[in-house]
Amino acid sequence: MRKRNWFDRSRLGKGVVSAWAAMFLAASTSVWAVDAQADAAAANSDAAIKEIIVTAQYVSQPVQTVPISITAIPSAELQAKGADDLQDYAESVPGLSFADRGPNRDALVIRGISPITGDSAVGLYLDEIPVGNVGYSLPDFRLFDVNRIEILRGPQGTLYGQDSLGGTIRIFTNKPNLENFGAKGEVIGSSTQDGGFNGDANALVNVPLVSGVLGVRLTGLARDDSGWVDNLYNGAKHLNFDHTDGARGAVRYQPTDRLEIQAIVNYQRDHVGLLNEQDPGFGRYRVYRLTDQPENQYNQQFTGIVKYRTNVGTVEEVAGLNNEHDNRGLDSGAYAGIPGYTLLYYNSAQNYSSETRFVSKLRGPLNFVVGAYYQGLERNALLTLVNGGTLFGLPGDYANLAWWKNWEYAIFGQGYYKITDKLTLTVGLRKFWERVDTPGETMIGSIVASRSFGTGNFQSVTPKFDLAYQQTPNLLLYASAGKGYRAGGVNPIPHPGQPDFSPTYKPDWAWSYELGEKSEWFDHRLQVNASIYYIKWSDLQINGIPTDPTLGYTTNAGSAHSQGFELETVTRISKGLDLEFGTGYTEARLDQPAQGAPAGATLPLVPKWGLDAAVQYERPLVAAWTGFTRIDWAYKSSMNEDLPADAIGTIPNYELVNLRFGLKRSKVQLYLFVDNLTNNLGMTSAGGTGQYISRPRTVGVDLRAKL
């Protein structure tokens, strides 16, 4: 029987792909009616879509000239959306799916590369420092005073290294302004259906201490979410509350045009009553938990950035330390199948990284980036079943303790050669070496039940090839192939009786092949970006004991593939009226049986379809006031949490609608907003421990003022 591919499986897929192909072919013809000078003038007018500058290739470039599939979200758009956390912007990124399990419990998947176990396959960076590479969940940084977010789709193994197997998300905070004093404040009050009152207060001050040379920027935030989930066991209301506070301090020193130094400290703390979940069978926003599940989390990051500009390029040093701590209580019945006990979890991670690179700025056809990278990670994890020794007829607790120590060294380079004025070839290469030490210990009271010490050494090479053709100033066509990887590891708990057990597991890796175009039409009033891709993912890291992943081990098995496309459009209908539309199709399946699932099984947390749209309208009113209206809509098709798929892990399709109305003038903005207008039960994750859900309908007021 002929094997059917993803074009055959969906009539909707056929229609969208055909439309994309027709657009791509049409774009490849020179049909521009205006010359470059007219285009440039239009680009600077209010009638044109504003240009967004990104540094995805370590060079400041307009996003439309970078031959990578990127969604760039600038500060103005984040504010227009009212975005404060990951879900607020992730819904509108084609090819990105996620499980929002509550504060700092985000699982991200780009282009279907969905980890079954192990670390995240999406690299997350805050001010160029990697964070969150200590497990599947990633931290969720508040977005007040953020300059922009860059989402790079597809493996980014050459410039960004390990854990960017599916892609990379980069968050940039605002630098201190060296010329002008500034201050800004924001107060938000809202009410959540089935919940209570929520309050936010954010503020920043920017002070140039020495004009043009030295400045500081201080930011503070506080957030109090009341929660909306009730516990039927003890009658506790609004159990999933979240109290957040944070601060950021940045110093920028620029004594000459050549030298720039920045130091940044970022801190965020969350006290959480329960993750955003409900238990099946107990009603909407209801759980039945025998014990409370409080959680205390904090993330602290120290960042140093030095840039020295020469006549032929810039020498850059980026170094930082990210500390992450997490203490929580778990329901022993829900998580371990042993009700009636107190289950505690503690996690601590320190992640130090340093990267030195040279970014050339030559006048000839060749430019390049070369660099060296080091990362050292230490993590401790302790899982304690209080008085669990009684299960074995012994006094004391039952505890599993594991330590992880990872060291990675890498060298990399990426060159850009202009074959002609229009055609550019990019070749990149990264070589990495990694060592992992993972001692582990199981204690029953004061008795050591088991002890292990494992070491693994890994190395690999990740190349990249791009061919970009700038047919006109408004049309870029590109083709690329590249490899990404995710770190290997050591199993801290031995399982000598299992036939496929190994003390170590290898890195998994993926080859990606992509065709894309970026175009602008009608004097920069219409922007169309599209890409189509195929990814081969090999040596998958999977659970060796699918029925017991908590106490099981990790191994490698077989391969999988992911294929699909993304389309993003922005249209400026007239001055003040913008339309946005995006869609992505992803099919991600196993090629060989793995973890009890047959070949052809769909990978977890990968919806086939994602669609989003937005309408934003601004119009002058009276007395220097401007009216503002924005509607955001997002849709995700159904998916499954588990491999193999089961009924418990079924996640139905959902859609969310957000509205914002406002009045704006030069220094004051007032908004009325309604999030989740239709009060849809937006489920993003589901499994044996509960169903993770989006916030119910929330109505509020947002007041902003600046000096």
Image (cartoon, rainbow, N blue to C red):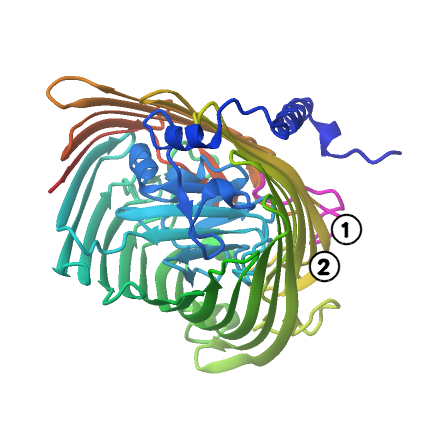
Residue at x-position 52% and y-position 71%: 392
State the mark number for residue 207: none
CA distance separating discs 1 and 2 = 8 Å
Q: Given the image, on which type of amino acid does mark 2 rest?
A: Ala
According to the image, label 1 marks what residue? 592
Q: Which residues are magenta?
A: 590-606
Question: Going by the image, does 607 lie left or right of 443?
Answer: right
Nearer-the-camera pick, 150 or 325 = 150
- Image position, residue 272 (x, y; %): 30, 51
- The answer to whether residue 8 is above or below residue 301 is above
Question: Going by the image, does 306 lie left or right of 93?
Answer: left
Please state, as top left, top right, bottom left or bottom right, where the C terminus lies in the image.
top left
Question: Going by the image, does 436 lie left or right of 698?
Answer: right
Mark 1 surroundings within 10 Å by alpha-carbon count, few (fewer than 14), some (14 through 19), many (20 or more): some
Q: Given the image, on which type of amino acid does mark 1 rest?
A: Gln
- The answer to whether residue 11 is above or below residue 4 is above
The answer, for residue 391, to whether it is visible in the render is yes
Q: Are marks 1 and 2 in contact (CB under 8 Å)?
A: yes
Q: How many marks?
A: 2
Residue at x-position 64% and y-position 63%: 462
The answer, for residue 332, to whether it is visible in the render is no
- Image position, residue 166 (x, y; %): 57, 51
Nearer-the-camera pick, 97 or 646 = 97
Q: In terms of secondary structure, where does tag 2 sit?
A: strand
Question: Going by the image, does 165 lie left or right of 598?
Answer: left
Q: In terms of secondary structure, where does tag 1 sit?
A: loop
Please state, as top left, top right, bottom left or bottom right, where the N terminus lies in the image.
top right
Q: Is residue 592 magenta?
A: yes
State the mark number for residue 557: 2
- Image position, residue 214 (x, y; %): 18, 63
